[in-house]
Amino acid sequence: MPEWLIYTLACALVCAFVVAATVMRHRRVADDEDTSQTPDVLEYMVMMVGVVYAIVLGLAIAGVWEARGAAEDTVRREAQALYEIDQRLDVYPAAFHTRVQRHIDAYARHAVTTEWPAMKEDGPVDDTGGTLLTRIRSDIAHHTPTDELQAQAYQPLLDQVAAADDARHQRLDSAGSTLPGVVWFGLIAGGAVTLGLLYALQIRRSARELMLATAFSALVVFLLFLVWSFDAPFGHSGTESAQPLLELYARSV
């Protein structure tokens, strides 16, 4: 299911629930109940709960945003290291260059088509990618340089393989949810309490108040959806975050 559809459904359900609950409460209010006054202590509690929840929600958004940025940077470093290997092999014989290039293409294809779906589902990832990198390292390490240019490129090539291997391990370690379950419980419970305080403020069924309550509910749902969307560093659908590796994979398609 697309993320925009998930947000639309969640927002519509929460807003409909808030409006329906407000209308039902208004119908059950006694005729002599004064809804024009709100106790000062209640306004203070609402303000404090709103401020605390806003701080927690802001920290959660900042945390998942930083994790998403770090994951994207890891993918770029991995793809850049593989690209540098391909480019630096120009000083080697064409047959050797073509053989290593096939291994790079196989690695990029495996990462995009096999490892990415497993990472999105937070499932186990086999060591095929590591084996392919080991094959690239072995090809380079066992090829004796025959001239000065090859000798100068030899060690940097091995360094780039090591950089790609390190980036791959960081990518796999970053897969899955960023926030622990207890934080999600606090975010959802805090959102429910914050929206529940709309009833404590004795909202009446005026169009203005219902509009404000609906807009506030939609904002809370949007922020929670934002946290959920960024909570998966490599996305919940598609392989958009694999774009750097997709560019390498595209050469072999």
Image (tube, grey):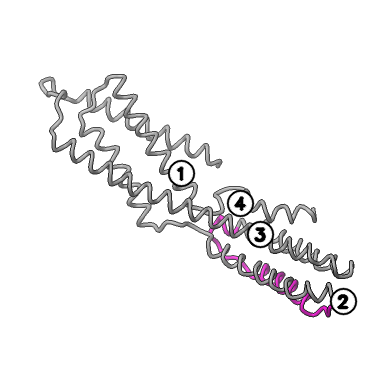
Q: Position of residue 85 (x, y in %)?
A: 75, 66
In primary-sequence order, the first of circles 2 and 4 is: 2
Using the numbered discs, state the Cα–Cα distance from disc 4 to disc 3 in whole angstroms.
Answer: 14 Å
Residue designated by label 3:
114
Which badge, 4 or 3, is on the more N-terminal residue? 3
Find numbered disc 3 in the image and state the secondary structure of the residue it sits on.
Answer: helix
- Evaluate if marks 2 and 4 touch, with contact meaning CB atoms under 8 Å apart: no
Residue position marked by numbered label 2 in the rendering: 147
Q: Which mark is residue 12?
A: none
Disc ID at residue 226: 1
Q: Residue furthest right?
A: 94
**Quadrant housing residue 157:** bottom right
Return the disc, 1 or 2, that comes first in the chain's sequence.
2
Mark 1 to mark 2 CA distance (whole Å): 55 Å
Single out the mark in the foreground, 1 or 2: 2
- What residue is rendered at 73% in x and 75% in y? 155
Q: Is residue 207 left or right of residue 44?
A: right
On screen, residue 142 above or below 24: below
Residue pointed to by mark 4: 241
